[in-house]
Each structure stands twice: as structure tokens, then as C-alpha cells.
Amino acid sequence: MPKSRLHADPYLIVYGYSGRLTPHENASLRDYARQIGARVLTFGGVQECGDAFVECSPFELLAYFRDAVGIVTDTFHGTIFSIINHRPFATIVRASTAGGYGNEEKLKFLLETFGLSSRRLDGPEAIGQLLSTPLDDGAIDAALASERASARNYLAANVLFPTAQEMP
């Protein structure tokens, strides 16, 4: 991962698929960015609110997350990258509708796992409040350590050292 900043000016990240942000969400993001003197960089898909769409390597993407003043996303990866990098973020959780994709199940679980349900963006008017509220880094680090230990234990028990009964 690059050690230096990849973008000199302050910026917000909007990370999501093209076309999923509503006009109200786009306008609120643009307004908030202007209030704090930041640019809006979009990743994953072009967004109406964006000042620039950035194509980059996975390692560069992690560096962009590391240095962002805030992140708004409606994806699992955008949420977990925000958490790991201790960046203020807001996650748009969308319910599944008839024939339409929702992300509610996995994002609700992820936010609850890390005690961050308050980071759920229920309306665009809350963007500024969420992004200006710092995260509790100690609580996040404790939850990350616990989840990583759980994953290691699961892998050790089920992949690395399976019982003879489970082997073909």
C-alpha cells in the first residue's frame, strides 16, 4: 500500500455502484463536501455528486480510504474498509424490494458486529452529523481483534485440522 497520500486536498469518498444514490443523497453529499472544503472522489461507480471518478489498484484504494476525511458507502467492502481504517463513515442500508437488490442483511449484521449501528444512514440530512462524529478506535480495535481470533479458530478447526470424520 502506498505510504504517502495519493490526493493532496481533503476529500470524501463515495464508494458504491453507479446509479444507486438518489438525487437527494447526491445533493446532500455535494453540499456537505462544499461546507467542509472537500472534494468528492467516487470509487466503484460514477456518482452525480462526484468531482472525480478514480480508477486505481486495490492497494491504492486502501490508501485512499486511509486518508479520507469521511466515507459514504452502500457496500460491505466500503463499510469494512472504513472500519479497519478508523475513518468516519456513513453506510446507506437498502432493503430488498420486489425484483430489486438490497444490502440490508449483510450490512446490518456487519454494523451490529462492530457496535456501529449508529453509522447507518437513514436519511441524507444526517450525512454531516455522521461524518463529523469520530469513531471509538479502542472499541473498534477490540472488536476487530475478537473477530480475527474467531476467524482464526474457525479456520484452524475446519480447514487446517479437520477431524478424520470430515476428511474424504
Image: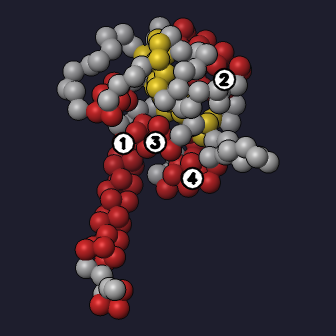
- Judge depth for marks 1 and 4 and give the one in front: 4
Residue on which disc 4 sits:
106
**Separation (CA) of disc 2 from disc 1:** 25 Å
The amino acid type found where label 4 is placed reads Lys
Q: Residue at x 23, y 32 (%)?
A: 1
The quarter of the rendered structure image containing the C terminus is bottom left
The amino acid type found where label 1 is placed reads Ile
Q: Secondary structure beneath disc 4?
A: helix
State left or right for residue 37 relative to residue 9.
right
Mark 4 neighbour density, 10 Å: few (under 14) some (14–19) many (20 or more):
few
Q: Are marks 1 and 4 in contact (CB under 8 Å)?
A: no
Q: Residue at x 22, y 27 (%)?
A: 2
Residue on which disc 3 sits:
77
Residue at the limit of the structure toward the left, as seen here: 3
Q: Earlier in the sequence, mark 2 or mark 1?
A: 2
Picture coordinates of residue 154, whole percent (x, y) = 35, 71
Q: Earlier in the sequence, mark 2 or mark 4?
A: 2
- Judge depth for marks 3 and 2 and give the one in front: 3
Q: Secondary structure beneath disc 2?
A: helix
Q: Earlier in the sequence, mark 1 or mark 4?
A: 1
Residue on which disc 1 sits:
84
* Residue 16 appearing in the image: yes
Position above or below: 44 against 4: below
- 82 or 46, nearer to the observer: 46
Q: Earlier in the sequence, mark 4 or mark 3?
A: 3
